[in-house]
Image (cartoon, grey):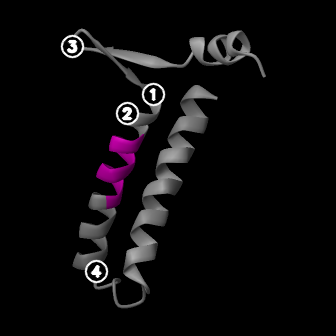
């Protein structure tokens, strides 16, 4: 793949203008995924569901990835 093809393929990446600075769309989706995972974690703690989730260091990053990818595919694919 030539350098020109690489440049053109990344030229139209979705980005947001946030306070005068452009951010890639995946960063916005990742922040939303982390926030959603935090809300889910608090909900699971309140209903005592965390005992059934094992191993937690794999469950919560997987949930973050699921929400992040689902948001990105829904809004920017």
Q: Which residue is mark 3?
A: 19
Span shown in magenta: 30-37
For disc 1, the neighbor class at 10 Å (few under 14, some 14 to 19, many from 20) is: some
Residue 38 is situated, as x and y percent measured from the top left of the image, at: 28, 60
Magenta segment includes 31? yes
Distance between the alpha carbons at the discs numbered 4 and 3: 39 Å
Q: Earlier in the sequence, mark 2 or mark 3?
A: 3
Distance between the alpha carbons at the discs numbered 1 and 3: 15 Å
The answer to the question of whether label 1 and label 2 lie on touching residues, with beta carbons closer than 8 A, is: yes
Closest to the observer, 40 or 60? 60
The residue that appears at 43% across and 57% down in the rendered structure is 64
Residue 44 is situated, as x and y percent measured from the top left of the image, at: 31, 75
Q: Which residue is mark 1?
A: 25
Distance between the alpha carbons at the discs numbered 2 and 3: 14 Å
For disc 2, the neighbor class at 10 Å (few under 14, some 14 to 19, many from 20) is: some
Q: Which residue is mark 4?
A: 47
Q: Which mark is residue 28?
A: 2
């Amino acid at each position: 793949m030539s350098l020109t093809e690489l440049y053109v393929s990344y030229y139209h990446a979705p980005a947001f203008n946030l306070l005068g600075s452009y951010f890639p769309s995946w960063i916005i989706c990742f922040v939303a995924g982390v926030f959603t995972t935090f809300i889910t974690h608090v909900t699971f703690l309140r209903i005592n569901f965390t005992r059934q989730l094992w191993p937690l260091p794999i469950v919560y990053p997987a949930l973050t990835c699921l929400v992040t990818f689902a948001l990105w595919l829904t809004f920017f694919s």
